[in-house]
Image (cartoon, rainbow, N blue to C red):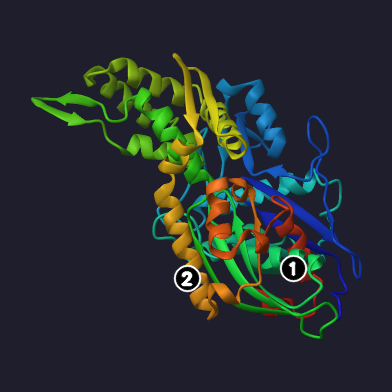
Amino acid sequence: MRTAPRPVIGLDFGTTNSVAALAAPATAPQLIAFAAPDAPTDVFRSALCFWEDDATSTGVASAAGPWAVAEYLGWPQGCRFIQSFKSVAANRSFERAAIFEQRYSFETLGRLFLDHLARHAGGSMAARDSRIVVGRPVAYAGHAPDPALARQRYDAMFAGFGADIHYVYEPLAAAFTYAARLNDAATVLVADFGGGTSDFSVVHMQAPGAAQRFTALGHAGIGIAGDDFDFRLLDRLVLPRLGKGGEYRSFDKTLLIPAGYFADFGNWSRLALMRNRRTLEELRRLHRQASDPDAIARLIAVIDNDLGYPLYDAIGQVKRQLSSAEGATFRFAGAGMDIKADVTRADFEAWISEDLARIEATVDQALATAGVTERDIDRVFMTGGSSLIPAVNRIFTRRFGAERVAVGGELTSIAHGLALIGQRDDVAEWSA
């Protein structure tokens, strides 16, 4: 297999984090280190922060990644913080985000994010003749996702970013990274658990040195992953204190508070955009009519003070603690709330049980698409942050046996594998 005669960048543009790997011709890929406020990092948060600045041509300045987090934490009242905007790539109802009177399409947000990403890469991503291999989910997040629309938006986002752009299924890229561990032929199920989607590929791998080492057998994916697990915790621990399930009076009727206000808490892109005049005016009217006006006041304060980041940070801490302990304590203070709640791993697993069942059904779909059974799978490679959740891991150890399951490269395996695929002269054959 000949290698590409140009630099290759493998870019894992993730819902929560983005990682990139650079491979010069005939050299092993190396992760790109990005400048950050504290120390260089190879994991760049997929986030943007905006603030008003008269010195800019548009009157709005921006930062991305850890710089966006630092800007927000330094001045939360004056910022608009957006994370997980990748989750709306295939959503036809999302057209533009209104931020400080400016309107941003998905591709505009994406190009802005890429510009910041490249700027903090210290020149590593500056070669315009580079081949760029971008990871994409097998199935996009959201209700009734439109893959053709997502591809159109990705094309616009990456236009001009490199000379040769390819898109590859993320679990397929992870398979190329995992292959370095294998000395014998094997049929491998790769399970990639990101922030927005859970994706699966079945790949047959020949022993090292084979002329054609990799054969992709089948793929499946579902728009359920880490962000959904976060929302289950938020839904149980926080939203009832913000008025979910409460009532309000409208003329002579008693009605439930509209669920749409709380559904928006399940998506960073929507939560950040709730801080607009129309939504806040609606909530102030609701506050006057609610049976528990204090709860609606807390809801307004969370939105008006843009507390989504610290709220989800507290949720994320509990989720991570429950991966290594049987119990954890959730704590959050702000917007008139001071919440302290003990959570057991058993509670959390009960709350995500329906999500786990749908993920397991998607594993069945991947096997069926590949034309294999559980007995045909020699190895399982799990990657992505949610692969560390015990209940997720148990799906695979129960079905395939712990001895066949490996976990690793939770945040970096996809970018590394994308660069490996980009080095191949048959890269087009692996493109989705």
Judge from the rendering whether residue 77 lies leftward or rightward of residue 17; answer left or right. Answer: left
Of circles 2 and 1, the one toward us is: 2
Judge from the rendering whether residue 162 lies leftward or rightward of residue 400; answer left or right. Answer: right
Closer-to-camera residue (52/9): 9
Q: Position of residue 142 (x, y in %)?
A: 44, 54
Indicate the quadrant where residue 75 lies.
Answer: top right
C-beta proximity under 8 Å, tags 2 and 1: no
Closer-to-camera residue (171/330): 330
The answer to whether any part of residue 360 appears in the image is: yes
Q: Position of residue 136 (x, y in %)?
A: 61, 62
Which of the labelled discs sits on residue 365, or is there none?
A: 2
Residue plotted at (57% across, 33% down): 81
Residue plotted at (82% across, 71% down): 423
Of the 4 image quadrants, the one containing the C terminus is bottom right
Residue plotted at (51% across, 30% down): 308
Q: Position of residue 89 (x, y in %)?
A: 52, 55
In the rendered structure, which disc, 2 or 1, sits on the residue that comes first in sequence? 1
SS label for mark 2: helix
Task: Please name the amino acid that badge 2 sits on.
Answer: Gln
- Other residues around mark 1 within 10 Å, as few (<14) / some (14–19) / many (≥20): many
SS label for mark 1: helix
Which of the labelled discs sits on residue 176, or is there none?
A: 1
